[in-house]
Image (cartoon, helix red, strand yellow):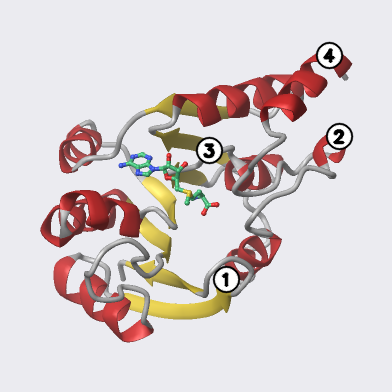
Amino acid sequence: MEPQIIATIKEKLREYTYHPIPFEEFQEIKWSRESRDRFQMIRETLPSDLTGMRVLDVGCNLGYFCFEFAKRGAIVKGIDQSERELNIAKTIATLYNVPVQFECLTVTPQTIQRLIANHNQYNIILFLSVYHHIVRKKGLAYARHILDGFSHLCQTMFFETSHFLFSNLAPTDTPDFVTTEICEHTQFTTVRLLGKSTDHFQRYLFRCDVC
Ligand SMILES: C[S@@+](CC[C@H](N)C(=O)[O-])C[C@H]1O[C@@H](n2cnc3c(N)ncnc32)[C@H](O)[C@@H]1O
């Protein structure tokens, strides 16, 4: 391994990481979301062989989920609007020779429409703890367009959201709210609550399918 590159990444991540970096050399880095529990909940609903599965991780941050899927043979693309996080994720992908395609991109209804128009299709979209940020910045109607777009791009979406800490909007994280949102505003036909993680704030994780 390249000790200097690893040391540089560790220095950059000294103050804060959202989720772990799933490689031996980064075990001691402190993160705010444990995340292995979330990955486990997701995996339990999928076939044991992930080889060749096409996965899009929207708001992938440092790429924890991208790396976990790619290590198991999935074909993974991670997108995030944060250049800083993505540059670190790209460096780690190169360092460990894990074939994840990372792209710096802000997800908007237009970017989703472009993906649909270009016939991109995924087996799985991960949309974990991003939705509430978009609702807060752009409003519910805007965020719903994005959610609906995902139901045209994949068969299965794993979805996690949170409540609003900094606004007076109603909580969006209750199972009833999420089920209604998704069934009424997207093409997903089933919404299943997989569980909740409580390491940060309480957050529910859902699996949504187009049947
Ligand atoms: C709270 S983190 C969640 C990270 C990861 N999905 C997880 O659950 O571990 C939210 C991430 O979404 C990204 N993000 C927020 N809004 C976005 C948007 N419109 N397009 C792309 N990325 C976005 C942020 O840069 C950040 O990395």
Residue beneath label 2, please?
25
Do the residues under discs 3 and 4 have CB atoms within 8 angstroms? no
Residue beneath label 1, please?
45
* Residue 143 pos. (x, y %): 20, 55
Task: Name the front one of labels 2 and 3.
Answer: 2
Q: Nearer the viewer, residue 155 or 12?
A: 12
Residue at mark 4 to residue at mark 2: CA–CA distance: 12 Å
Compare marks 4 and 1 and give the one earlier in the sequence.
4
- Disc 1 marks which amino acid? Thr
Do the residues under discs 4 and 1 have CB atoms within 8 angstroms? no
Compare marks 3 and 1 and give the one earlier in the sequence.
1
Q: Quadrant of ligand 1?
A: top left
At 61% from the left and 70% from the top, the residue drawn is 41
Asked if residue 118 is positioned above or below residue 162 in the image, the reply reads: above
- Disc 4 marks which amino acid? Gln
Asked if residue 114 is positioned above or below residue 3 in the image, the reply reads: below
Q: Secondary structure at mark 1?
A: loop
Residue beneath label 3, please?
76
Task: Name the front one of labels 3 and 4.
Answer: 4
Residue beneath label 4, please?
4
The total number of labels drawn is 4
Residue at mark 3 to residue at mark 4: CA–CA distance: 27 Å
Compare marks 3 and 4 and give the one earlier in the sequence.
4
At 34% from the left and 29% from the top, the residue drawn is 105
